[in-house]
Structure formats: C-alpha cells, structure tokens
Image (cartoon, coloured by chain):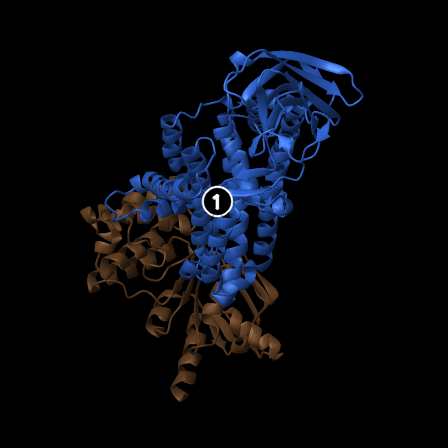
Amino acid sequence: MDTIIRAENVSMCFRMDTTRTTNLKEWFVKWLKREQKYEKFYALKDVNLEVERGDVLGIVGRNGSGKSTLLKVISGIYKPTAGRAVSAGRVAPMLELGSGFDPELTGVENIYLNGAILGFDEKHLQEKYDEILDFSELGEFIYQPLKTYSSGMVMRLAFSVATMVEPEILIVDEILAVGDPAFQRKSFERMMQIIRGGTTVLFVSHNMEQIRELCTKVMWLDHGQVREIGPMKDVCDRYEAAMAQG
Amino acid sequence: MTQEKTLGKKILLLTVAFAVLAAVFFWVVRENWEYTSVQTDPLTSSGLIPLAEDREAVILQEFPCEADELEQISLVPGRIRPETAGKIRITLLKADGTVLRTVELDAAGLKYDEMNVIPLEPAVDGCRGQKLILRIDSGDTGVSFQYGKTITAGKFEMEAKDTAGLTVQGTPLEGKAVMATRGQNRLGLSWLAWVLAGVCYLGCLFVLIRTEQSVKAQKNDIFFMMAEVRKRYSFLLKQLIHRDFKTKYQASVLGVLWSFLNPLLSMTVYLIVFSLIFRSNIEYFPAYLLTGIVLFNYFSESTTQGLNSIVVNRALITKVYMPKMIYPLAKVLSSAVNLLISFIPMFIVMLVTGVPFHKSLLLLPLVVVFLVCFCLGMTLILSTLNVFFRDTQFLWGILVTIWNFLTPIFYPETIIPAAFRTVYHMNPLYQIVYFMRCITVGGVSPTPLTYLYCCLAAFIPLALGLYIFRKQQDRFVIYL
C-alpha cells in the first residue's frame, strides 16, 4: 500500500490573544508599554500520522482537541510550527455553505469558480458538468444567479461540486446533513460510493454512528495529542466509553 | 522526441515574435532616440526694449546654446512708432566675435506683438554649452523687441533666474529679450533598442529552456514550480478575474458603460474647474487630463480593492490551500481589463480634440506593463499590511488623495518650483504618467532615461511586494 498522507511530529503552536493586535493604535500602545508578551498554546503537539490510499480515517475528539487544525495542516493551510506534513495527492475540502460561491454569479459560473478553487482545471470540470448538474437536482435554476437560491439549493450545489470532481483526498468536516431527507440519503450513498471508488477521506464528526458506518480507521485526539489511533471498532468503543464517563 | 520538437517550435515562435517586436520597437523609437528636440521657453513680456530714436539701434543678447543643432530663434517684435520700414539685420555671433549666421528681416513682413520664428539655415552646429550672442541691428526701422524679467506657469508668475546679458546701445539693461530657441540634440542611442530587445530575448529564452529541462527531469527547482503553479492555477485565476469583472457592475443599469463614462465624467469636471482657475496653456488639455485620469483611476481602483483581497477572501483562505498571491493578482488584473476599456473613450477624446495619432502610440502596451507591475507591487505590500493592521484600508484612502495631488494629473508640471522637481520626479506614477503623455499628446517616444525610470518605478515596488508578501503569507491564516 502506498502512503498518501504522512505527518511527522507535527506541532502547531499559536500565540494567545495578547499579541493579536489588528489595529495600529493598539499595536503602538503595546509597543510603548513593552507589552508584547504572549502565552503559547499548542493546538497540536507531536502528532504522527500515516494514511494509506483508500483509507477512510475518522478523527474524533472533544471540542478544541485539534481536529480541524490537523485537517488544515494536512491541506497546507497552516504551516506547522514544528515537524512536517506531506500529502501526495490533491486535497479538496468540502467547503462550508457557500464559502466558495459568489451570490451574483449563476449556478453554472459558480460550478466553474468553485471547481477552480478546489484545484481542478477546465477540461475536468467540463467532463463532470452534467454529473454535477444532475446530482444537484437544480435543473433550469442552474442558469439563475445564486442569490435567488434557497439555502437548501446552495448546499446541494456545494455538495455536488465537492463530491463529483473526484479529488484524491477529500476532507469532510461535519457537513453531511445537507438538504431534505431524500437528498441526505442520496448524499450519504454518494459518500459511500466515493469511498468504494478508492478516494482517501478524512472525516471529522461527532456523530459516532456515521463514523462507525464509514470509517476504516479512527484517530482519537485529546488536547492536541494523539490518544489512540487504530482500527475503527477498537478506538470507537474506548472513545465512547471515555465520553460516557465524562 | 516529441518534447524536443515542441521545445524547438516554442523557440522558433519566441524568436519570430521577438524579431517582429524588436523591429517595431526600433521603428518607433529610432528618431526619438537618435535626436531629441530641445527648446528654451520665452520669458513673460514686460514691454519693449527702450530704444533712443536718434541713434542707430543695436541690441545685444547673450544666451547659452543648449542644442547640438540650433535650428531656429524666435523673437517678439513691436513698433516704437506708428510706421516702420527698412531692414533689420540679425547676427548670431560666438563669444569671441566669430559671425555664425546673418539673417535680414523686412520690417514690413513682421508679425507684430507675437512670436516670429527666424529659421537658421543651415542649423548652427557644434556650439552646445557655449555662450552665443544675438546681435540685432534695428537701425532706424522703428522696430524694437519685447523683453521681460519673469516667467509664467499656469496662473503663477515668478522671477526668472537668468536675466543677464542684455545690452542696448552699449549700456546693460536688466531683463532678457523675450526669445525662444529650438534645436536638436544628437543622442545616437537607437542601437540601444536592439540591445534591449536582445537582452529581453535571451532572458525569455533562458527561462523557457530551463523550465522545459526542469519539467522533463521533474527537478524540484523554481522553474519547475513556476510551471506547475501556472498549469494548476491559471484556470482559477481566469475564473477569479471573470468573477470580479462580472460582479463589479452587476445590478447597475448601465453596466460596463460605466468604464467608459467614469473617466469621461471626471475629465469634464476637471475641465470645467481648471479651465476657470488655471487658464491653462497646456496643449490638448482634455487629452492631457484624460490620459492622467485613466492611469490614476487604475492605480486607485486596483490598490484600494486589492488591499482588501486577502481579508475579504478569508473564508476560502482558511479552508482551501492555494497560492494566496492569486487574490491580489486577480484584483489587479481584473481592474486592468477596466483600464483597457477606458482607453477607448481616451482615444475618442483624442480624435475629437484633434490630437494627431503618431506611431509612438504603439508603445502603449509598455505603459500598461509598467503600471500593472507597479500597482501589483503596491497591492501586495498593502494587502499584507492590511492583514495585520486593518487600519491600512482607511489610511490608504487618504494617501491616494494625497498621491493624486502629488502627480501631475490635472495641473501642469511647471507649477512645481524647480527646487522640488528632483523629489517630485521620484514619484513612480509621475514617470509612468509622463511616459504616457509623451506617446499620446506629445507624439514621441521618451528618451531611454525615462524608460529606465519607468522600469525602476515598476519593478522595484514589484520586487519589494513579492518579497514582503512571500515572507509574511504563512502568518496570514493566524491573523485572519
């Protein structure tokens, strides 16, 4: 098996709020008072991770345990303060509602814009265009500006673009509840299809049912450190037991 | 095998393209890089040189010759009595008394109280930097000439510095004859056009070949990375430019027409205001205004919008990896589309107000390149700054206004006192606007020195912007 994501001793350290001056006056006052002190906060500490092609890795942990930070390090948005993370494939995040969309543009234009943001070229998007349109169930609305859509329609389009373009690594951060129950079922099936198709998926969720259904491997993060990583069933059982105790 | 073939093809294409461009460039700049015309401006008249009627009138005026080839001298004659007749002899002498040219003017053929051009045929050669003496033997013709002590620029009048050297009938008189000279300086620099084209060609060739090599060998160096980035993100760039351009005039009734109307309306406002205040003596004032307005509008639009580009796209930047530079770049380029559109009303105004179209207009793409590079550099610096200090956007609004006043957009450059000129010329926008006016209103290519200044004005900010942006971009996500 070949490794598609490798993280070695990744640490991510943030400075706490005292230095986050975003206006000149504050900065100047602090500089005058020599108050540029800050506390360090480790969102991730010495995380090691190897993901093989085709794995579906679930990441669990309490709020603030560093799940989203880890995903950002893997997709290259954060540069780790120590260690390194490399991924050998194209990472596409499933964007939150509308963040890659422009309300003034039509659905068609948004498919291309969003596809381009996710890193795909024109030819690939043209090939996938019919599938995306079909899956989103938008029909003639696709030629209307996005601002006329209902929020359900926007989400359907976002989900369609993100899953139809077939990235090598798909990052899903809690957004499987899209649209009406029928579309939810359809999108869940689509996720399964992607997974069977060999796409590597990193999946963050608090919904243990979904984790159990989709993942092959689970990683448990606790205060920025890896508590456990291993086969889905073992880690899930122990995690749920720990959560039940509080 | 096929790869080598395409490389060969690319090199051939590049060579042909450069040969054509270099030839066009040489054709456009040759005359202006071989010779530049020089002229000295006249003082403002304060009256006629007083001549005693009972004597033979002789006026001597010393002046520095500033041209390699002095082609003409202009003077303003006036009547000291109602009827004038006879011949006036005008002699041009060297300081040591050698006679250079003698011209006889008929008093009846003069245009009184306006500039009379006296051509020197053949042109006086080889006196540049020397003091020459203009001797006017007015005799008993009843003709004198205007003289003055001040120069006028716009609505301001100031003391002229050099008012010595006037002698009337043997006695020195304070002031200087109202005279203008015109001639040509030999630059002999047209060969530089070929050298520049050659250097650019070799540079492009080097990048092309190195990129091809690196891509072939999958070598992880800068050329390979640049090629990858181009391949992967050119479509995204296109999409972002399309979005910016399309959403700009969305929901406005006139849409893209505003790109036309905007510069025209500002021009009209300035035209009305400044033709009342300045009584400007600038040639082709509407075109002069519009060229400045179009360029400055681009600067102000691309930087004010671009400086927000990182902050506005924070939702994407914190979720998807991509070169962050793409956002400011997209803004600067989508504004450039606007700039190109606003050249259309500029050409229309030039046509309507009778500005002659010269081949120097072919240099317009250079202006665009200089300006876009300069604005991109500024935008990169500003958008970086704006991530850390959101005050930047408010501060910049004021700075743009100040910058507008520091650039000769709506006033003639001559109102700036000579003492401040050097500092004034350090404004990168000044150089680019000057270049623009040379090729449009002036109808000539600027001298090589202006090209150099424009290159500095464009590429130093760009290099600085790239450096700062690249150095800071990893910290952006933390502050967004």
Q: Is residue A64 visible?
A: yes
Task: From this view, report whether residue B304 is shown above or below residue B115.
Answer: below
Answer with the quarter of the image where residue B40 lies: top right
Answer with the quarter of the image where residue B97 lies: top right
Q: Nearer the viewer, residue B138 or B133?
A: B138
Residue B305, percent from left and from top: 42, 53
Residue B84, percent from left and from top: 53, 15
Q: Residue at x 40, y 29 (%)?
A: B350
Task: From this view, report whether residue B195 is shown above or below residue B327.
Answer: above
Q: Residue at x 50, y 19 (%)?
A: B82
Q: Subunit of mark 1?
A: B
Q: Residue at x 44, y 55 (%)?
A: B309
Task: Give the farthest residue toward the front.
Answer: B54
Quadrant that contains the C terminus of chain A: bottom left
Q: Nearer the viewer, residue B350 or A136?
A: B350
The three-letter code of the residue at mark 1 reads: Arg
Q: Is residue A2 visible?
A: no
Task: Give the farthest residue toward the left.
Answer: A140
Residue A83, percent from left and from top: 61, 66
What is the drawing colour of chain A? brown
Q: Report the label total.
A: 1
What is the drawing colour of chain B? blue
Q: Nearer the viewer, residue B211 or B432?
A: B432
Could you tell whether B323 is left or right of B252 in the image? right
Q: Nearer the viewer, residue A27 or A76?
A: A27
Residue B151, percent from left and from top: 57, 38
Could you tell whether B102 is left or right of B395 in the image? right
The residue identified by callout 1 is: B232
Task: From this view, report whether residue A137 is shown above or below residue B76.
Answer: below
Categorize mark 1 by other alpha carbons within 10 Å: few (<14), some (14-19), many (20+): some
